[in-house]
Each structure stands twice: as structure tokens, then as C-alpha cells.
Amino acid sequence: MTAEGFDDGQTDVPVGVAGPVERVLVVGAGIAGLTVANALRHGGVECVVVEARDRIGGRLHTVDLAGSLVDMGGSWIHTPAGNPMRAFAQHVGVPCRGADPSPELAGFDCGEGRRLSAAEVEASLSMQLEGFPEAAGRLLGELGPDASAADGIEAFVARAGLAPGSARRARQALHALIEAESADLAERQSLRWMWNEIEYGGHYFGDVPVGGYRRLVEAMATGVDLRLGVAVEEVTRSASGVRVRRADGTSEDGSHVVVTVPLGVLKRGVPRFRPALPPDRLAAIERLGFGRYEKVALRFDGPFWRAAGIPHAMIFPRDPGAVAVWAIGQDAFGAGPVLVFQVFHSATSHVLDAAPADTVQWVLDMLAEAIGSSCPAPAAVAVTSWANDPYSGGAYTHIPPGANPADADLLGEPIGGRLLFAGEHTQSARLAYADGAMTSGIREAKRLLGRPSVRLGPIVTGRG
């Protein structure tokens, strides 16, 4: 397989690199770090990737759940038309299939103890995906530039003239929407910057890679020099090069380093930087938000939920202050009898602060109420803990009131010509998206290679 040319959506060659690029160290083997390393290897530059985990992929993590492959981190390639991640999948021969749950989505209101009609579900989806986003500009003009998404929701619902039950569901649905897209509370998301990212073509839910994201991660990692299970404690730069010191006291030297750890890790002050990061970078790290989004995946002997008339579910809790919970049947997308509950920020205590058995019972109780009968015991279970993971510290980046997209763009600028950064948090064009992490890696490879585009693809040993 030959490598194919990719760019980051820009035709320029980023600047800011000092000295010859001879040996590049990459901290982190998520999709951003792997993209940098893959492109550099194709460009003939020596590159070593150091990863704290014993696996590659970072927040793209596919697990084998009793024979079903399930993505427990990123799963969709959103708006796939023109999306570089979709183009990479096509290039490396990974088929993708549509994975839009909305045509078969059912709704259940625990507060009213009833299943919603198809018209009610359609109206809710229209409000979430069209009505509220389209009203955001008008609401911002009324509420002011410092308004939160929660302020916008309250104003939007208050003016809709809905009956009490419908108003409660609207708030629960819209708060879930914001928490899903921002991985944090709507009170901590800026209304002004809510839908600021560029959009590619196609449906929002778009595609999923058949066999999970791990196939794309593995393709990007093929032929890359990887050092797994090695935590980095300190990154030192000087006028002549860089040194990365591991937790075991050993180190790697290079001409340049690209740090791709998530924003949640940077917020913890990891790794240490010598010299310290400039005050403006530290302030941007502090201002940007990095919240929670967890998943509970259950594999059963068969998709009994579909037989009960609920291929996918949007469940509205009794508590008016609790957000809607989505459960998506993976059988609809060829991934076997697996139901994945999407647990948004305000509900993650049910996952992070509970024993796995209690978490599973929580989601099964919701499902049993929705289908009107008890549920069989799952054959296998997977529960995430991204917020408690020291190598992620949460889900993905968002922009709170008081921050702005320039904060993310600043984090993508090199320091001292030797220290570079990549990751979804280092650019504002596709903040929070896996393809944004990928294009940030392309950006840094362009910078290091001095080229307007780079080549990506599995590396055959002995060839570039």
C-alpha cells in the first residue's frame, strides 16, 4: 500500500521550528501522536513515540466484548463527507458504515411512565439538532457574550410555551445535547462558542469504522517506533535540543519533541516542563474546559430491546434536573447484540463513584422500565472511567464562558522552536473531535517537515 497525501485543511507551511529536524520525540500514542510519527517516518525523519499506557490509541479504544468490537471512547466519524479521518479509512481499506440512531430512536419518559409517540421523538430531535442551534445566535444577542449554554436553554424553553411535561423533557434533552457535545455542564459551556467548529458534509452521526476505531489506529501505528508502558515525567528543552525523562529515570534525547497528552493531563501539571510553560499557555490551559463522558456497554445473547420496540432509546429520568440518557443498540450497525449507554457529564457519578455492578444495575433498571419487563443478565460488560484515568483526565475539550477559540489555537503554537504540541485541544477548527486530533498531528508534521502536505499510511519496513 502506498502512502497518500493529507493536509490539515490549510495550504500553508507552519513556521516556528528551530534547527535541523533530526530526531523527533512524540509523547503520547493517541491518534495525534501516531499521525505525527507516521508522517515523519514517511518523510524520512527518525521519530520515537513514548506512551504511558500499555496500548496505543489513547481515547480511541476498541474493546472485544465477548466477540463484539465496541468503541469505548470515540466511535463516530462525524460529518464524514470531506472528513480526513474518513479519507484515511478509505485509503487504508477500512470500510465504514452509517451509524445514525435517530431514524429508529424511541423515547421513554420515566416521570410520566410512558413511551413517547414517534411524533414526540421527532419533535425532540428537531429541537435538539435544528431548533436550538439555529436560535443560538438570536439568544446570544439577547443574553450577551458571556452567556452560558444553560442560559440559552432556559431562555429558549421559557419562550416555547410548552406544557410542563414537554418543557421538562426539553430541558433534559437540551442539557444532554450540550453535555454530549461539550463533555461538561451546560453552565460551563459558552453559548457564544457552542457551535464554532467547522463542519464537513454529511449527517452529524455519520459513519463508524467497521471493526472499530482500533483498525484506523493500528493502520496509523504500523511501522512506527513505539515505546509502550513508559510514563514521561519531564520534558526539557534547550537551544540545541530536547530531553524526555521517563518515570524510571531513563531518558530520550532528540532535536524536537511533540507533546500530545490530553488537556486533562496538562491541567494536572503533567509532564513537567523545563523551562516552565509561558504564563499565557498556563492561563489558556486553565481557561479551557475538559469534562466527563462515560460509557456502559452491555453484551447480551440477543437484542431483546429491539424485540420490545426500542432499537435505540432516549430515556428521560424522573428527576427534572437529570439529563436524558441515550442507549444505542449496536446491533443496528452490525456490531452484535450490544447496548451502549451514553452517560453524560452530570450523570457520571453513577459510573465513576459506584461499583461496576451498581452501575450496570442502574442502566438495567432504566432499560427495564422503558421496555416494561425485566432484563436478562448481560453476558459481558465494559464500563469506562476516562475521568479517573491519569492518562486522560476526562473526555474532551470545550470552551467555557470567559475562554475563546484562540486559547486552543495558542496551545498549538511551538515554544522555543523545539517544543511542539498536538491534540484535539490544540486547534479550534475541530475541537473535541478525533479528526481534529488527527489534523493537529498533520499540522505539526507539516511544520517539522517544512511541507504543505504529508503522506500517511501503514509503513512497510525498510521503506518510507
Image: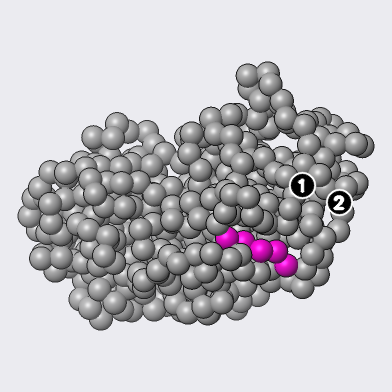
Mark 1 / mark 2, whichever is N-terminal: 2
x and y, in percent, of residue 424 in the image:
62, 55
Q: Does residue 454 show up magenta in the picture?
A: yes
x and y, in percent, of residue 304 in the image:
12, 59
Residue located 27% across and 46% down the image: 65
Callout 1 amino acid: Leu
Dominant SS in magenta: strand
In terms of depth relative to the viewer, which is nearer, 342 or 111?
A: 342
The vertical placement of 212 against 49, above or below, is below
User: Mark 1 to mark 2: distance in Å?
Assistant: 9 Å
* Range of magenta residues: 453-457
Q: Give left or right: position of 228 versus 333.
A: right
Residue pointed to by mark 2: 17
x and y, in percent, of residue 422 in the image:
68, 51
Residue located 71% across and 25% down the image: 251
The vertical placement of 329 against 99, above or below, is above
